[in-house]
Structure formats: C-alpha cells, structure tokens
Image: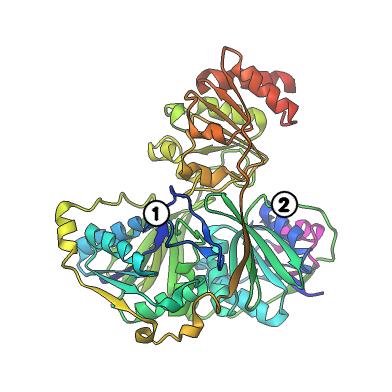
Amino acid sequence: MAEVLVLVDHVEGAVSKPTLELLTLARRLGEPSAVLIGAGADAAHGALASHGAEKIYVLDAPELTEYLVAPKAEALAQLVADTSPAAVLLASSAEGKEIGGRLAIKCDSGIITDAVDVEAVDGGVQMTQSVFAGNFTVTSRVTKGTPIVTIKPNSTTPQEHPAAGTVETISVQVSDNAKGARITETKPRGKSGRPELTEAPIVVSGGRGTGGDFSEVEAFADSLGAAVGASRAAVDSGWYPHAFQVGQTGKTVSPQLYVATGISGAIQHRAGMQTSKTIVAVNKDEEAPIFELVDFGVVGNLKTVLPQATEAIVKRKG
Amino acid sequence: MNIVVCVKYVPDATADRTFDSTDNTVDRVGVDGLLSELDEYAIEEALTITESGGGEVTVLTMGPAQAAAAVRKSLQMGAHKGVHVLDDAIHGSDAAATSLVLAEAIKKLDHDLIITGMASTDGGMSVIPAMLAERLGIAQVTFASEIVVDGETVRIRRDGDVATETIEASTPLVLSVTDQSNEPRYPSFKGIMAAKKKPVETWSLTELGVDPAQVGLDSAWTKVTAYVARPPRTAGEIVTDEGDGGTKLVEFLASNKFV
C-alpha cells in the first residue's frame, strides 16, 4: 500500500489535535507516514504511533525552523520524490497552506485547500470542500501529480490505531535560495487556558451586543468548557484580539455547538461558522439574520440570559 | 521602491454567488463582481510604502474583460499604472496556472515588492503568494500585520495563533497583508478623475510567452467534479426571553447532550 505523508503540526513534540485528525483520514488513502520537522521527535512518537503512523520521518536541522516555510517545502518535496506517496496531507493553517503552495509548484502537483473530507474513490483521492461562505459543498480531484491537500480542523474525530511508528531520520540540505525570510523573534502568545478556537467542540462568540465587556461570554464559555470567539465588529472595536475573530477574515470554525451572542450574523461572520453542527444564538434583535441559521434562539439581552444559563449549567454539573 | 500589487476581480460576496453549470467553474460573469475587498489592504500598504519611500505601484490582474473594474478601482485609490492579462485561454485556470501567468507578468514589470491580499474572497485558498515566490525563486512572508521597509531590508510582524513573529527578509519579496494591517482609503474625487488618465496595458498570453496549453480548465491540476447548494438550515425554535431565556437555553443544550 502506498504511503500517505502527513506533515506533523507540533510545538516541541506536542502534537496538535488536527495532526491526529490527518493521520486518521490518511488511513483511508494508504499507510500514514508522519513527517516531523524540528525538535521533539521523542515526545511526539507516542501520539503519532498510536494514531496510525507506520513510519515517522524525522527531519531536524536548525535551518528548517529558523526560516519561514521554504526549507520545509524543500524537505517535503525531497520526501515526495523518494516515497511517491498517494497523497500529502497538511493542516489548513497559514503555514500548511504556504508549504502546500510551494510544494505543489515544486512537484508539479495539484493542491486542494480547506478540505473537510477526503476519501479514496476510483483509485484516486476525492476531496470535499465547503465554499462561498458555506453555501455550497464541492467535490474535487487532483488531476496532476501527487494530491496535496490541506484539511480543516475538526473534519473528523481522531481515532486511535496502534501502528509501528518506525523512525527514519532524514538528513536534509537546505538551499540558500530557501533562506530568504529569517525569523528574528518569536513571542509566544499568552495562554487563555481555553481550548484552541478552531479545534474546540464548543465555541461561544460575542459581538457588538457585548458592548465591549466579554465577561458574561467568557463565564458562559467556561461553564461549557468552550473556546471564546468574537465577531469582526467586536475585534474592529478593539474589544477582543484578532486571533479570536470568527469569520471570512478570521478563523473558520466547525464545532459541534456554536453559540453566537450579540452577533447579528452578517455574511462576513456566517462564512466562518455556518458549517457548525448545532447553532444557537442570543440576540436582542428578533430580526437579526443569525436567527435564520439557528437550531435554537433566544431573543433577549445576553447580559441577563447568559449569566442565568451559566448558573444553571454550573448547578447541573454540581 | 517599485511594487506590484496582484488583485482579483471576484463575485460580490453579498450577492448570490454560484457556479457555471457547464464546466463547474466560478460564475464570474452572471454575478456582479468587484475588486476583492481584501486586496484593498494590499493596495493601501503599497501606496503607504511608496508615498514615504518613492517608487511606483503597478496593479496586476488577470481575468475576463469585467476584471478591468478591479484595475480601475485600484488606480482610483492611487496606484500608478495597471496591467490586465486578458486571454480567453485563461478561463478555468486553477491556482497553479494563475501563479504561472502572474509570475510571467511580474517578470516583465519593475518589482522590489509584490504585495497581495491575505486571500481572495471567492476561492480563498491563500496559496498564490507562496506559489508566486516559488516560481520567482524568492521568499514570501504572508499574513503580515505590519511592514517596515528599510532600504533593501523588510521587517514584518506576523500575529500568528500561537506567537507573534518578527521576520526579516530582503527584496525582491512577496508579501501578503491581513485586514488588520491598515485602513484602506476610499478613492477621492480627484483620484477618480486622475485614474482615467493612468496607463493600463492589456497583455495576452502570447505577449507573456505563456503557452495557452499550460493554463485554463483543460490543463488545470485540479478539477471540481460536482457542486451542491447546501440545503438551507431548517428554521429552529426561537423563544423570547421573559426572565427564563437562560433556563430555556440550558434545557435545549441539555436535551442535545451538550451539558
């Protein structure tokens, strides 16, 4: 069976949940081989092998991480040439797309981004995407070269699948040409203690209706163990950091449950949350377009509705 | 510093965007189009850089005849000249072919920087900057929040999910900017009048030395096999808060096993 290369997204060997999702999907197409670039191979081994990685290619050289994506794309292109994989799967992050874009040109291969599903069909690979703000579902194929696919977080549930996890250390030569953009400083973002927005099974977002105070939204989110998001209006007003913006120019989320509070539901916001499984809204304006999308809606002020709901949830959880 | 800004003519996101049922491509003719909103940030960034450091901004697009509107708007904002790659063979081009055409056009233009928006508002792939950089053999830095040009050195701040990075690169360089990077200007009346006199060149693939067989739908490296409109979400239950809105909300969540 052909290998399927999965680029591991990790911080010092702490493997992200989307990577485990990629490994789970890769098993449908062939034998998953994890590609781990940077330090942390020992820390990552358990998670990768227990989720189906038959092989783990370890590429660790300072040049691979001191510069922006170009060296990683070079290294992956080398692996593609050496292993002739059935597909290359990457996370749909900024980095995943940049590496994928360069890789596609290097390998004369088609790329599909933001896939929400991937399956083996007629000896090839078929991708499903949600486009035009979630208004259309599109299936597509790569017709040239090795399918390169970036997959959105939450597209599947990671499944444990014990595999060999045989480590192969690969030495790479990074060309000078790939060293054009050097990372001179990295300031880690403070951790909120909440789940990562695009990976969380529940997301609670606040908008203009918060009036700038997200405390009710955050307390409600915490009672559900949810991530907190914000509308563009809230972010543009400086009420919440851009990293938490849900919408066309922010994050696209597809959780089991999405709760929009004080958000009218303009197309810009809908583009980022329309594919959520269950949608709930709280808004003072009964005419708000968000109510066209919801499974359940409360016409009311989030400042009173949310604290009451938070209290009820805390009581239930005892 | 001379800058090429790549812009795209896209179907209006607030209109009913759809596909052309004959070949599964994006309907760019039957739906009102405009300059992709996210490209305005790229134009603004380029104008700001040239206003303080000198140089010219060339706006580059490819697409059907209507795409000239995207060039016009860019010129009205203040770009100095425009190039429109117009050729029937381009229809249906995927990202790889798009990057080929743009890269060949860029090679013919003075460029220290190439700036794009963070994504198009239709395809939204965000892969063109990386593909352009790969084809041109130069570096790219995408999703820039802040750009500082210092001679041939460019310093970029990127606000990522887990960290804020500072990146240093040298020209020539491909950059994409986010919608947090600046506040795009509106065309002034003077700008609108001035734009009418600005040079716009229309180039064919032949002029670029691109073989038409390398682009278009038939030679695309990817293919849309089917598209289906998402079924409208069925209207859910809406209650009005009469002092028990929070309680009812939790009852709904509990009955769906979220609490």
Q: Which residue is mark 1?
A: B145
Q: Which residue is mark 2?
A: A156
Dominant secondary structure of the residues highlighted in magenta in the image: helix
Secondary structure of residue under mark 1: loop
Residue B61 in the image, given as x and y percentages of width and height: 36, 69
Residue A45 magenta: yes
Q: Extreme top residue here?
A: B243
Q: Residue at x 73, y 20 (%)?
A: A316
Chain assignment, label 2: A
Q: Quadrant of the N terminus of chain A?
A: bottom right
Residue A6 in the image, given as x and y percentages of width and height: 69, 66
Instruction: Please state which of residues A289 and A262 is positioned toward the viewer in this rendering.
Output: A289
Q: Amino acid at mark 1?
A: Ser
Q: Residues within 10 Å of mark 1 (few under 14, many from 20)?
A: some
- The image quadrant that residue A97 belongs to is bottom right
Q: Quadrant of the C terminus of chain A?
A: top right
The magenta span reads A41-56
Residue B163 in the image, given as x and y percentages of width and height: 51, 52
Residue A36 magenta: no
Q: Is residue A171 visible?
A: no
